[in-house]
Amino acid sequence: MSGLLALVARDVRIAWASGGIVNALAFFLLVTILFPFAVGPDTALLARIGGGVIWAAALLAALMPVERLIGPDAESGVLDQMSVRGFSMAAVATAKIAAHWLGFGPPLMVATVLAAGLLGLPAETLAAVELGLLIGTPGLAALAVATSALVTGLRGAGAVAGLVMLPLAVPLLIFGAGSIEGGVQAVKLLGAVSLVLLAGAPFVAGAAMRGSME
């Protein structure tokens, strides 16, 4: 267990030190800054669609570091060392999901407050968006790690990761945006999708990592 916790702490530290998380957050805020220029200064329109814009920006920002979540460790032999120490690849994938969420989820929720101000979202809408992100970003982290494991070692892994992750993330995007005004039922659907991804992603990623080690 201590080895997995050390892996989580290491991955969070690398994510911040490499600037990957900062770049993702900067991209997220840039999208929310530019969007009002595209649709005009209609505050009523921005308030109505702003929550969906935040979710779309969050999804695209989550995609940015995908290529670096598994690949460097596979190339440097870290995964082999974890396997030799008796850790299953599914457990390693779970640790990486936790690390990716800790590095990405809470900062994104903080940045959402700034984005809400730029889009003119009322307080109740912001609260609904934050609740949806709290429930949905773990699913995004799980999907990102599974995608990273699947594309490890492929030529043009970044482009392939986008093709793999974006279609699979559509349910999260739909239910996440729908939870803003959809009430408790929509939040439950978002939670269900996120839980399915959290339950299945470690095994998918673990199998892919074992394949990359052979």
Image (spheres, rainbow, N blue to C red):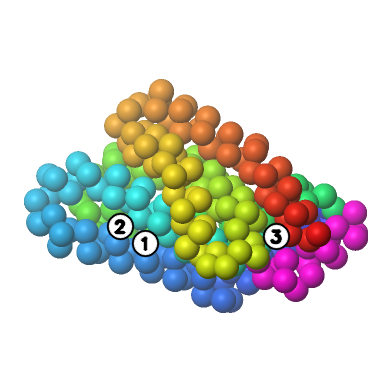
From the image, which quarter does the C terminus lie in?
bottom right
Q: Is residue 9 above or below residue 177?
A: below
Q: Residue shown at 77%/54% (left/top)?
A: 210
Label 2 vs 3, first from the N-terminus: 3
Circles 2 and 3, Cβ within 8 Å, touching? The answer is: no
Nearer to me, 22 or 158: 158
Kind of residue at disc 2:
Ala
User: Quarter-wise, where is residue 86 in the image?
Assistant: bottom right
Q: Residues within 10 Å of mark 1 (few under 14, many from 20)?
A: many
Q: Which residue is mark 1?
A: 28
Label 3 vs 1, first from the N-terminus: 3
Q: Assign a secondary structure to mark 3.
A: helix
Residue found at the far front of this picture: 155
Q: Which mark is residue 115?
A: 2
Q: Residues within 10 Å of mark 2 (few under 14, many from 20)?
A: many
Was residue 74 drawn as part of the magenta stretch in this picture? yes
Q: Residue shown at 51%/65% (left/top)?
A: 158
Examine the rendering and report whether any part of residue 92 can be seen: no
Q: Would residue 32 be found to the left or right of residue 97 on screen?
A: left
Q: Would residue 28 be found to the left or right of residue 92 on screen?
A: left
Q: Which residue is mark 3?
A: 8
Q: Residues within 10 Å of mark 3 (few under 14, many from 20)?
A: many
> From the viewer's perspective, is the residue at label 1 or at label 2 nearer?
1
Q: Assign a secondary structure to mark 2.
A: helix
Q: Assign a secondary structure to mark 1.
A: helix
Kind of residue at disc 1:
Phe
Was residue 157 drawn as part of the magenta stretch in this picture? no
Q: Position of residue 165 (x, y in %)?
A: 49, 50
Q: Is residue 146 above or below residue 19?
A: above
Separation (CA) of disc 2 from disc 3: 28 Å
Circles 1 and 2, Cβ within 8 Å, touching? The answer is: yes
Nearer to me, 205 or 3: 205
